[in-house]
Amino acid sequence: MSERIEAELVASVREIRVSEGDLVRAGDAVVILEASKLEIPVLAGTSGTVSEIDVAPGDAVEEGDLLAVIA
């Protein structure tokens, strides 16, 4: 089973903290979003392997947009 990591707010992608194929643990920061000059870490909800990254630094995202997938 895989976990879809989605944006929870309108923001821009400040930083990608992982690469496809990386092992992550629940609670690890996967992506850092920026909104209103605040940095918001988006955390993995489960442990696994990053199978997909769907954004790049500088991308604008809307609530519900897919950021990454953990398998």
Image (tube, rainbow, N blue to C red):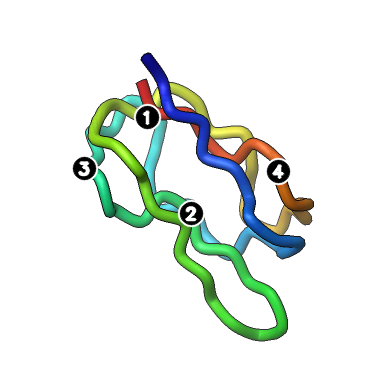
Q: Position of residue 54 (x, y in %)?
A: 62, 34
**Residue at 25% in and 45% down:** 26
**Residue at 63% in and 50% down:** 7
- Residue 50 image label: 1
Residue occupied by mark 3:
25
Q: Position of residue 18 (x, y in %)?
A: 38, 44
Q: Is the Cβ of the residue at disc 1 closer than 8 Å to that at disc 3?
A: no
Q: CA distance from mark 3 to mark 2?
A: 14 Å
Q: CA distance from mark 1 to mark 3?
A: 10 Å
Q: Is the Cβ of the residue at disc 3 closer than 8 Å to that at disc 2?
A: no
Q: CA distance from mark 2 to mark 1?
A: 12 Å
- Label 4 or label 2, whichever lies nearer to me, is 4
Sooner in the amino-acid sequence: mark 3 or mark 2? 3
Q: CA distance from mark 4 to mark 2?
A: 14 Å
**Residue at 36% in and 20% down:** 71
Residue occupied by mark 4:
64
Sooner in the amino-acid sequence: mark 2 or mark 1? 2
